[in-house]
Amino acid sequence: LADARIPNLNASKITAGTLADARIPNLNASKITAGTLADARLTNTSLFVTGMIMLWYGSVASIPSGWVLCDGNNNTPDLRNRFVVGAGTGGNYSPDDTGGANNRTVTISGSDTVNISGSDTVNITGSDTVNISISGTTSFESLASGANHVSTGALNRRHTHTFSGSGSDTVTISGSDTVNISGSDTVNISGSDTFDNRPPYYALCYIMKT
């Protein structure tokens, strides 16, 4: 087919077969002035090849003809609920590799030494009742001697006094002091937690050219 042989091509007239690049050496696309050319009339080298995967912004029911949902059927990979990562020679992934999980569990175990140092001001205020109990014995001894001492009784007199008592009083405490803190202790750590590790997402359909 030469450009000069197709003055006004109606694409809708191409209803069978396929057009290969080799069969159109010098076709000027401006000669196709009407109609539409169906995908089925083009070879794989023209627009989309079998196995090509794209994202589809629409419902599953409205996937266009010639394309199917990547759900594991019709020779498609099941890409539902999955992210796609690049694969290839020299990378960490090969085609058809799968892996990952929606949730991860982190387990922590072990011990560590915590050093504590510093100071803080402690304010003290309040009151309390203190009980007081007192008892005991005291003695007094008088010794008279010398010419100037006059005594009408016996010398070396001793007086003994016994006393006891109890009671209570309320003590009020207020003020502040600076307390210095220093030292270290070993802390044991253990436990586990499960968390969702997915980033924010927007869901679209992966579709493949058949």
Image (cartoon, rainbow, N blue to C red):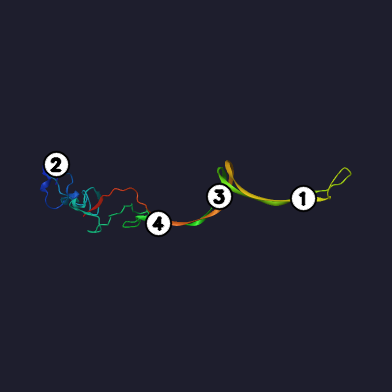
Tell whether label 2 touches label 1 (CB within 8 Å). Answer: no
Cα distance between the residues tagged 3 and 1: 64 Å
Q: Nearer the viewer, mark 4 or mark 1?
A: 1
Classify residue 143 as left or right of residue 129: right
Residue in the foreground of this view, choosing between 138 and 27? 138
* First reached walking from the N terminus: tag 1 or tag 2: 2
Secondary structure found at label 2: helix
Reading the image, the residue beneath label 4 is 105
Cα distance between the residues tagged 1 and 2: 144 Å
Secondary structure found at label 4: strand
Which residue is located at x 50 percent, y 57 percent? Answer: 110
Return the x and y of residue 31 as percentages of the image width and height: 14, 41
Which residue is located at x 79 percent, y 51 percent? Answer: 158
Classify residue 149 as left or right of residue 62: right
* First reached walking from the N terminus: tag 3 or tag 4: 4
Classify residue 57 as left or right of residue 104: left
Residue 31 marker? 2
Question: Splitting the image into 4 quarters, where does residue 51 fall?
Answer: bottom left
* First reached walking from the N terminus: tag 3 or tag 1: 3
Which residue type carries mark 4? Thr
Reading the image, the residue beneath label 3 is 115
Which residue type carries mark 3? Asn
Return the x and y of residue 178 as percentages of the image width and height: 58, 42
Residue in the foreground of this view, choosing between 31 and 65? 65
Tell whether label 1 touches label 4 (CB within 8 Å). Answer: no
For this orientation, the residue located farthest to the right is: 147
Looking at the figure, which quarter contains the C terminus? bottom left
Question: Splitting the image into 4 quarters, where does residue 10 fall?
Answer: top left
Which residue type carries mark 2? Lys
Residue 159 marker? 1
The reply to whether residue 159 is visible in this rendering is yes
